[in-house]
Image: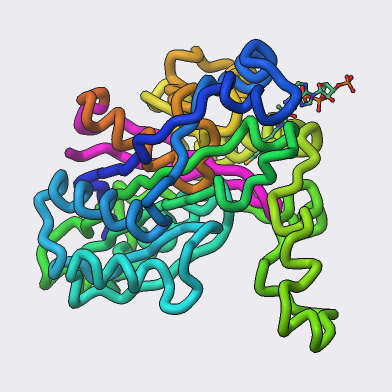
Amino acid sequence: MTATICGTGSYIPSYTMDNHDIARMVETSDEWIRERTGVVRRHIIREETTVSMAAKAARRALENADVLPEELDLILVSTISSNVILPCAACEVQREINAVNATCFDLSAACTGFVLAYNTALAYLAGGIYRTALVIGSESLSNLTNWKDRGTCILFGDGAGAAVLRADGGPETAAEDSGLEAGYYFPVTHSDGSKGSALTCKSRHDFNGLTDADRQGCPENMTDESHYMQMDGQAVFKFAVKRVPEVIEEVLALNRISTDEISYYILHQANKRIVEAVAKRLGEPIEKFPMNLQEYGNTSSASIPILLDEMNREARFAAGQKLVLAGFGAGLTWGASIVEWHR
Ligand code: COA
């Protein structure tokens, strides 16, 4: 059995900060940011939260899929920036949208998160365990950004994207058949924890080493810079331009698909130069690599589903087209999946 994406949705905060706004906060310029990253502006939460954006993206995806909330068996939220720890963001979304039959949990894998959440949902559906799943990437990275660090604050933004997946075949098929068949594409994913120091963010709930006095007041280490994202930009850049083309080649070879059969490569939207380098290394035209990072910056696990939703709503996909989704980021983690479009 396999499963297909039957609807997408997204939510973007209306408040924006352009590069000139950033240049008033740190020593940088619109020209430098555009040239080195491609980012022009980013959308930042005001009233919104990771959960509220996820729920709005979810409602739009359900509407687009023509699926009722009670039909959902699974809600998976990929996030590193949730406003809640307990209950998990996925349970909060369940409550908001009234998806009473869903099993809900979160997944934390930074900018590879949406690809891993998609793979997880697909495995449940292909295995006949669930029939209908909602996969969401939602991030409020502005809360994890050190707005005094020009090496990182130029890059990130907030937003949410979602996709509804449905198992193919009738309900009786789901119960009887857990075999994989044509139309199921195996993903390829990797992690390398030994390189984790390239991109870090310490939990504000890490009380290790605090004194009793710290616990009662405002602990020193609650405000230090390690609670914001810290990045070795060049190391992450080099990792991405090497590993992303490799994993795309791996996933194509594993599924015996040639680059000619791929209509679009939906890459995590981190940096225009990374996307261009991946296209070049694969020998593929840049037109196959849609980008919207100029408008949103890097929204971590939300970037792939936001781009999918924009392209879906612009009717840029046709039934039968094959897409590659590729994520990469902190961990380090990276991975690619093939999606056959069936809407
Ligand atoms: N504005 C102006 N100058 C800046 C700057 C900024 N925002 N940030 C760094 N600089 C300066 C540096 O101080 C350095 O100056 P120097 O040559 O006088 O020492 C110079 O620009 C070059 O710095 P460098 O760090 O080599 O820049 P870079 O070309 O690597 O660009 C990033 C920096 C962060 C844009 C780039 O490394 C990058 O995009 N990395 C990947 C990050 C990423 O995608 N992370 C998320 C992955 S999921």
Please give the name of the residue rendered at 85% of the width and 80% of the height, measured from the top-left corner: 209
Q: Is residue 42 visible?
A: yes
Point out residue 191 in the picture as x, y percentages from the top left corner. 68, 55
Left or right of residue 48, residue 155 in this image: right
In which quadrant of the rendered view does residue 32 lie?
A: top right
Asked whether 42 or 237 is in front, the reply is 42
Q: Is residue 282 visible?
A: no
Please give the name of the residue rendered at 64% of the width and 46% of the height, measured from the top-left corner: 145
Point out residue 187 in the picture as x, y percentages from the top left corner. 49, 50
- The vertical placement of 268 against 264, above or below, is below
The quarter of the rendered structure image containing the N terminus is: bottom left
Asked whether 212 or 185 is in front, the reply is 212
Please give the name of the residue rendered at 33% of the width and 70% of the height, measured from the top-left corner: 92
- The vertical placement of 144 against 233, above or below, is below
Q: Which residues are magenta?
A: 317-343
- The vertical placement of 275 against 242, above or below, is above
Left or right of residue 251, residue 312 in this image: left
Point out residue 14 in the picture as x, y percentages from the top left corner. 35, 35
Question: Where does ligand 1 appear, by image quarter?
Answer: top right
The quarter of the rendered structure image containing the C terminus is: top left
Asked whether 126 or 223 is in front, the reply is 223
Point out residue 202 in the picture as x, y percentages from the top left corner. 72, 62
Left or right of residue 147, residue 319 in this image: left
